[in-house]
Amino acid sequence: MGGWPVGETTAIDEAEGLAGDAFPVALRAAIRASGLSLDRIQYRLRARGLTISVTALSYWQSGRRRPERPESLSALKHLEEVLGVESGSLTALLGPPRPRGRAQRTPSAMPIEALWNNRQELASLLSRMDLNSDASLTRISQHDRVEIAPDRGERSVRVRQVLRAEHDGADRWISVYDVAKPGNPFPRIVPLQSCQLGRVAKDPEAGLIVNELLFDRPLSRGETIIMEYEIATAGPPYARGDDTFCRKFRLPVRDYVVELRFDPSDLPGFCHQIATPADDAEASTRRELVVDSAGRTHAVILGFGPGTFTVEWGWPGTG
């Protein structure tokens, strides 16, 4: 299954502030040298009475965040011991605290096509769309609900987004879908709340479809909107993708929730989530997900992005 961009929410640190930052470079090198996964590092810190999330560790080593609060600086001292580096060596690389607050930060968005393998084809489709509103919309929250049919094909995805306009006039959202397997049919986009379908551009060979979802009216600066739409596949039978669900974020998303629902009579043998930062694939983190007897599971991530969030599943004996 392909993904939908282009999640972006709160502003992030200036890109030039991250360039050449010695702290994340040294931290990544220390983690690699230790041979420990982020999950294992978190476990060892927890054994010392410290609660540091895997996401926070990932942010520290990617440079998107760094320890500045007193409790984080205290944890960093223990982290140096866990990684076996000289005491104070990482702390010394932090330098002075960075400015905080929206006034001191500027959004740094990746191009929409940057996280896709078929960038050229997607860029061609996007050139037919009005992208002016996209940079004016802050993504406050994103909620995807994925329905997998009894034949293991994708039945539908219901999308709910809370958006805020940062400038007057934002009036549309751009959605991208990848069918994942060549020859699979394109889905139907069904507006459900506060939007209607605008222009649609397709590339059958690349398996890409780009849609405009027009708001009921242009938003004023600071105004919020709750938008819902459904991505529905014709069936049965329902086309089976690659047994993954992928959401791509070109700016951080404040909170993201993805639900998956399988047929209770045919539960997958495994299911897990993978969070991959855009600027450091080696910092990818994996977590197992439990599918209950009713066929339901979900994942929640806070402050993630830019990057790709994927859920994978499968059944024994199938490719």
Image (cartoon, helix red, strand yellow):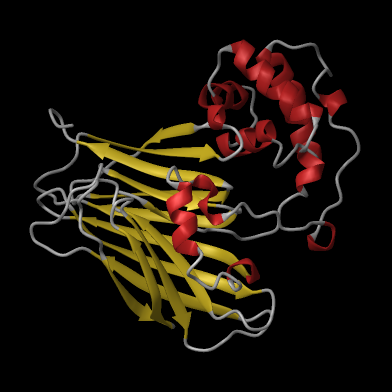
Task: Identify the residue at the far right of this view.
Answer: 96
* Place of residue 227 in the rendered image (x, y in percent of width and height, measured from the top left): 45, 75
The answer to which of 179 and 95 lies nearer the viewer is 179
The answer to which of 223 and 184 lies nearer the viewer is 184
Q: Where's the C terminus, which quadrant?
A: top left
* Place of residue 130 in the rendered image (x, y in percent of width and height, measured from the top left): 54, 73
* Place of residue 125 in the rendered image (x, y in percent of width and height, measured from the top left): 44, 62
Image quadrant in which you'd find residue 198: bottom left
Q: Is residue 52 visible?
A: no
**Relative side of 182 to 218, left or right:** left
* Place of residue 133 in the rendered image (x, y in percent of width and height, measured from the top left): 59, 73
Residue 118 in the image: above or below residue 134 = above
Residue 55 in the image: above or below residue 79 = below
Image quadrant in which you'd find residue 192: bottom left
The answer to which of 318 and 272 lies nearer the viewer is 318
Residue 265 in the image: above or below residue 193 = above
Q: Residue at x 51, y 65 (%)?
A: 127
